[in-house]
Image (cartoon, rainbow, N blue to C red):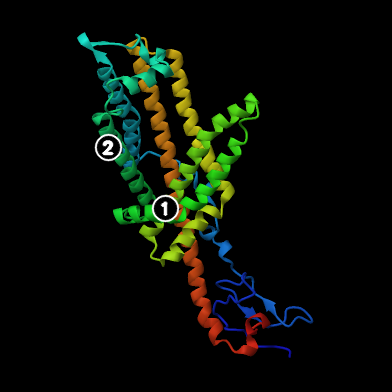
Amino acid sequence: MDRMRPLHRGSPVAVKGYPWLMAGSRLCFDGGFPGSPMTLERPMSIHSDEQLVPKGPWSFLRAALPGGFGSSGWGLMGGWALLALLPAFFWARGMVSNTAYAGGYSGLPAHWGEQLGAKDVVELFKNGEVHAPIGFMATSFLLLGLALVLACGWSMQARSAGLRGGFGGWILGLLDTLILGLVPLGLVYGLAALGLSLLTGHGFALLSWTAFVLRPLALAAFLSAFNIQWWLLRLGREGASQEFGTHLGHAFLRLWSHPLQWAVLIVGGAALRLALQALVLWTAWRLGGSSAGRVWAFAGLELLAASLNAWLLGWMLRTTALYWRHDLELRRAIQALKAMVAPATATAPAEDLPLEVQG
């Protein structure tokens, strides 16, 4: 048989067993070299389109560099600063009022912010007149700052993904996270906590200090990973109409199909945020609180650290949104290719199909 007619000339072909034959490919049985029953035109793979190349979250870090800037970003940074400063301020004022007695004098030492010991704190809360450990004003500003951070963060992320950002996707994504993310992420955190607990009790100070430092990092990383899983799920709820099982499966794969990249972002981001806060506290401890200027210096450092943490949070929100949008476009492109291929392979004569398709 010298020449055979092409299989579906001019139509895209991608058949089972030949995943590299995508849009624009044709099987041509025109002979190209002696003894060859067929030759292939150069196939155009989905990887040929730069916009549809599979990518991990690292690929979107540069595009997400605006971080916490922008209209919603400034709200995010303001809410984070409010969350860091005002609750602590009103809590301190409440503590001063609760520890004052006859004549307005306090039973605590002068400059009690640096001289109060653990025993004094226990005595204060156990036998003192502290009926509300946090206080109404501190609680109010705490909730206000948290609400502002959540609202502005969701608005920024939805806008970065090209979505509206409604409350339905936000709350349903949170419920989905409790179903999908709590068990696997909790298992990883439990194993990490177990490993850290094994470092203590051996009498080695270095191991004990290592566990002491890494425990808050492990908890912060767990909370960060839980948030990222929530972000992916709420974006899926808002922007992709899929069956519930498909929606959960795609969100799960978006997090767990790039474990190294996500782990570096999660652990590195958590370590940087904790390091900033620890640096501020260490500086405040060294400065002390013996004058109003030192107290205001501490407040300024705390405001700076809160702003940097909010910018880092915005960076992660934007990175996750851009990664989710790219992954959604990629999945839709693959689905469209499958839809084009299905009728082509269904109408092809059996004798023209490769053996993999005939079988």
Under mark 1, the amino acid is Leu
Residue occupied by mark 1:
178
Q: Residue furthest front?
A: 127
SS assignment at label 1: helix
Image: 312 above or below 348? above
Classify residue 152 as left or right of residue 315.
left
- The x, y position of residue 55, in whole percent, is 54, 54
Q: Residue at x 25, y 34 (%)?
A: 140
Image quadrant where one finds the N terminus: bottom right
Residue 236's place in the image compared with 206, above or below, is below
- Which amino acid, mark 2? Leu
Residue name at image x 43 percent, y 13 percent: 287
Neighbours of disc 1 within 10 Å: few (<14), some (14-19), many (20+): some
Q: Can residue 278 be seen from the camera position used here?
A: yes
Which residue is depicted at the point 35% across and 21% down?
299
From the viewer's perspective, is 14 left or right of 281? right
* Residue 29: percent from left, percent from top: 68, 83
Calculate the distance from the C-alpha at mark 2 to the C-alpha at mark 1: 24 Å
Q: Residue at x 25, y 14 (%)?
A: 100
Residue situated in front as seen by the camera: 139 or 3: 139
Q: Which residue is mark 2?
A: 144
Residue 190 located left or right of residue 317:
right
Q: Which percent across, then down, holds residue 323?
A: 48, 52
Give the answer, above or below, for where 21 lies relative to 105.
Answer: below
Query: Nearer the viewer's eye, disc 2 or disc 1?
Result: 1
In this orientation, does residue 66 appear? Answer: no
Image quadrant assignment for residue 356: bottom right
Q: Circle 2 sits in a helix, a strand or a loop, which is it?
A: helix
- Percent x, y for residue 121? 38, 20
